[in-house]
Image (tube, grey):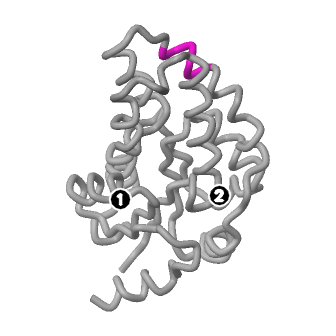
Amino acid sequence: MIKAIVFDVDWVIVQSNQDKKKVITETLKQYNVYWLPWVQDILDLGLNRKPIFKKISEIHDFDADAALETMTQKSIIFESNPIPNLLVIDFIKNNSNNYMCFTNTALPGTSLDRVIAWSGMWEYFKKHLSFDDGTKTQNVEYVLNNYNLKPEEVLFIDDNINHINIVSKNTWVHTFHFNDYDLSIEDKILEINSL
């Protein structure tokens, strides 16, 4: 039986993924690296902003820290007023007494704080885990270890199939590839609990 649900934020709780991709592109253009022929291969990996900039800086002379700060400043607008995914937000609000809920996002902690503050959902989560706390896998392991949960009791929801595959392979928790806003979390839980 599912006891805990771990939610990605971008493109699951809020619809900000396209805005984030746009700001990453704008920042890379500003630092004159976007058009390098191998940069698109790095972008296609579906990584967070920090590992993207780090990988580019390992290949090309590029100030990853300055670019990260630039992107963080550009992101404040959409992170402070994101488009909500009301179905997921309603699910969390209506079920926080039934399941332990956690965030697990590739956003930096300050960005996550802005999104959660905007949504008024502080009290619905046991813990707000971000990129600053660890990778997606490390954050799920934190939930397992610190809340005395077994893998079969945890559901991890993410829109990125790479994150789903890595977390599933390393932690054995249930996963839900959230690639359509009409998908039902309730139906997924019923499916898992009936196994």
Q: Main secondary structure of the magenta part?
A: helix
Q: Position of residue 126 (x, y in %)?
A: 55, 55
Q: Which residue corresponds to mark 1?
A: 161
Q: Position of residue 57 (x, y in %)?
A: 39, 16
Q: Position of residue 15 (x, y in %)?
A: 64, 58
Residue at image point 50% right, 47% down? 105
In the picture, measured across the screen, residue 66 lies left or right of residue 174, that is right
Q: Which residue corresponds to mark 2?
A: 14
Q: Work out whether 182 lies above or below 40.
A: below
Residue at image point 45% right, 11% down? 62
Secondary structure beneath dot 1 equals helix
Cα–Cα gap, marks 2 and 1 = 17 Å
Residue at image point 51% right, 65% down? 100
Q: Work out whether 190 lies above or below 75.
A: below
Which of the image's four quarters has the N terminus? bottom left
Residue range corresponding to the magenta coloring:
64-69
- Is 136 in front, or is 18? 18
- Give residue 22's quadrant in the image: top right
Res. 131 mark: none
Secondary structure beneath dot 2 equals loop
Mark 1 Cα-neighbour bin, 10 Å: few <14, some 14–19, many ≥20: some
Q: Which amino acid, by three-letter code, is at mark 2?
A: Val
Mark 2 Cα-neighbour bin, 10 Å: few <14, some 14–19, many ≥20: many
